[in-house]
Amino acid sequence: MGAFRQNIAVDIGSSNIRICVERKGIVVEEPSVVAVRKQTGEVVAIGRKAKNMEGKTDRDVTMVRPISRGAISEYTVTVNMVGYFLDEAVKNPIRRLIRPDIVTAVHCDITNVGRRATERALREAGAGRIFFVDAPLAAAVGANLDVSAPNGKMVVSIGAEITDIAVISYDGIVAAASVPVGGRSFDEAIKTYFKKEYKMIIGDQTAERIKNDYACVYRDVRVQPFDVSAFELSGRLPVDRPIRPDELIRTLSDVAMPVVEGISRVLEMTPPELVSDIYQRGITLTGGGARLAGLDVFISKGTGIDTITADNPHKCVVNGCMKILNSMSNERKNELMNN
């Protein structure tokens, strides 16, 4: 039966879950959210269907985001969510009999407890052999960096709630750190800005849309004004207000500054020879949070190191996981399982 096992990569993020299947590519890309009935614990909807229900259901239905800061916070909900999406990805009635080999990425600072919880949840959701990869290493492979080379590469992977920063050489992580900043940090800053400056209340989805489509973290990157429709804090009346992208620069740059500081800390931990490589070769940004306009320029100016954003940065981790798993022989997999 082992000869029929599929290779599957699973990236379970705080904001989204992505599943990549061997020879098929990414077949699942959905929000990591589950609608659950409070009284019974019954799962009402999962993923995009659940997110579309947000703010539109009765009080008995609550939205659960089972992954918090890269770790499982709601175990049973996570099992239900991952199992559901594995069924969607494989669509094979005997998937539970021929359990796939699964690789998943973990943050640099995950605890042993967190790792065991993730392994147990994947196993319960239908995984066979389970392999872990450090998220920055997976991101580097997904960004097509040569991680096996002896020179140093720096990858900054900006997720929904955590940014992983790592220097990679010879297929391993030489120095790394995690910063509690991510895409949602920018969303919250945008919401706070509108509440403070304009006495307007905007929701999570509106803040995310502003971040992705209009906002920037460095001057002159985006200049086209845009309109925001929201409720006034007093009176709760809907209003439309024109906004300039540069209004948000100060707010968003304050959020991004800890990432620059984290890069400096990692460089201090890195051998001088590899630091020299990084100054020559630059920094690569990955992760969904890397799509914020001007963030690469902001980091480049703050560190003095050329910074580029990888193609499709939000898919780098799952694609890297898939490449790593596909490169493993069955003997190598067995060896890792026995260690």
Image: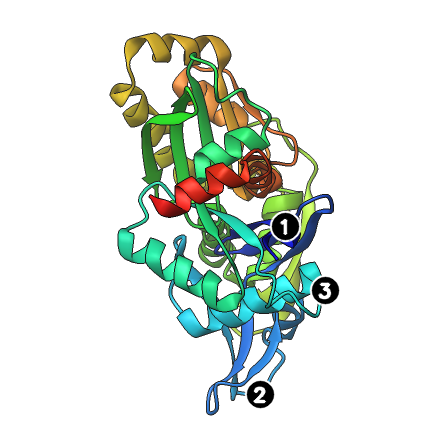
Left or right relative to 91: residue 303: left
Q: What residue does disc 2 label?
A: 58
Q: Is residue 33 visible?
A: no
Q: Specify the quadrant that holds the C terminus.
A: top left
- Callout 3: 10 Å neighbours few (<14), some, many (20+)? few
Percent of width and height locating residue 174:
33, 24
Residue 34, position in %: x, y? Answer: 55, 72
Nearer mark to the viewer, of 1 and 2: 1
Disc 1 residue crowd, few under 14, some 14–19, many 20+, Cα 10 Å: few
Q: Which SS class for mark 1?
A: helix
Alpha carbon distance from label 2 to label 3: 32 Å
Residue 198 at x, y = what percent? 52, 56
Q: Which of marks 2 and 3 is nearer the N terminus?
A: 2
Q: Name the residue under label 1.
A: 3
In this rendering, the answer to whether 299 lies above or below 70 is above
The residue under the point 45% across, 31% down is: 156
Look at the image and name its color scheme. Answer: rainbow
The secondary element bearing badge 2 is classed as: loop
**Residue that protrudes farthest toward the bottom in the picture:** 39
Q: In which quarter of the image is residue 273?
A: top left
Q: Name the residue under label 3.
A: 91
Q: Which amino acid does label 1 sit on?
A: Ala
Residue at 42% x, 10% y: name it: 277
Q: What residue type is labelled 3?
A: Lys
